Amino acid sequence: MPESPEHILVMRLSAMGDVAMSVPVLRALTTQYPRLKVTVLTRPFFKPFFRDLDRVEVFGADLKKEHKGVFGLYKLSKVLKEKRIDAVADIHNVLRTNILKAFFLGIPFKQIDKGRKAKKALVSGEIFEPLKTTHQRYTDVFTALGFPVSLSNPEFPKPVNLSEKLQNLTGDHQSKWIGIAPFAAHEAKMYPLESMKSVIAELSKTYKIFLFGGGAKEIEVLNQIQNAFSNVVNLAGQLNLDEELDVISNLDVMVSMDSGNGHMAAMLGKKVITIWGVTHPYAGFAPFHQPDTYALTANREQYPKIPTSIYGNTFPDGYENAAGSIVPEIIIEKIKSVIQD
């Protein structure tokens, strides 16, 4: 280990789930290398993700104004260099970070291998096997910089003591708390809402359900679900990201699609059950440190071309409701078994 502290710049600008997946890796990195300092370059909105990490500073990039375009990125690089960066870990590898790479000339700079060839083979049907996880791809970058990271014994923060505002929203914790995030960026990644209502109807008889989402349309749908059942609280539109993380840290289990909410819960050490439509965990985007059995996937005998894409944005006709091949009873049974472990 170096005698003097090292300072690594870690770049991951988006998307929410991918940024959240970096958190357990950075927690392991800074725990295993206690002299290491890390600056994370990301969007300001994601700053709360890193709130409990020691020696990790977040620098929020203003990509719409101050740091927009090549000149803006040049200004950004100058500010970052003033922080005395010793090395750069680019765990995003997109146009913006490649432009920044040119401005960091002379500083050790390693980039993520996204495994595009293998992922293309997976979605084309050429192969059907688990690919390297995104978390492992992140650790590979740090290994290349001389900091191999083990993810085998992860540590997680303790549940947060809820504020009075949040206690008033959530009520007591006498029964188990289940978070459900029924939406995803693409419709073909979602479990049919009518089927999800069946899941909520059954679970709300025994457990308290918290609904997560965002945007006016989602909030309206979730309010309707809240009003239809007892023991259901819609949190969408009522919390900032810090508060949302506080509640998630107190859940007993999170149920999500292949989406950012699952990764947010996983980075906090929660049990996460994921429901998969036209995407598949074999692509490497399953939430951190979850048993394979926690991922409920669509019926590939019925939908043999799954995964149809890595992100769920393209799929053949008739695949829109692939996730619906998972009957509500399977999801209910899985949640009950996981929550009782």
Image (cartoon, rainbow, N blue to C red):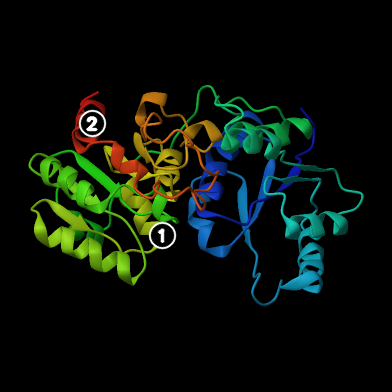
Mark 2 vs 1, N-terminal side: 1
Image location of residue 247, percent across then percent down: 30, 50
Image location of residue 248, percent across then percent down: 33, 47
Q: Nearer the viewer, residue 299 or 47?
A: 299
Image location of residue 166, percent across then percent down: 25, 58
Image vertical order of residue 221 relative to residue 193, above or below: below
Image vertical order of residue 289 relative to residue 92, above or below: above
Q: The residue tagged with tag 1: helix, strand or loop?
A: helix
**Which quadrant does the N terminus fall into?**
top right
Image vertical order of residue 76 relative to residue 316, above or below: below
Q: The residue tagged with tag 2: helix, strand or loop?
A: helix
Task: From the viewer's perspective, tell me whether residue 15 is left or right of residue 66.
Answer: left
Amino acid marked by disc 2 = Ile
Q: At 16% from the left edge and 59% from the top edge, which residue is drawn?
A: 226
Residue 330's tag is 2
Mark 1 lies on residue: 241
Image location of residue 85, percent across then percent down: 79, 50
Q: Nearer the viewer, residue 113 or 308?
A: 308
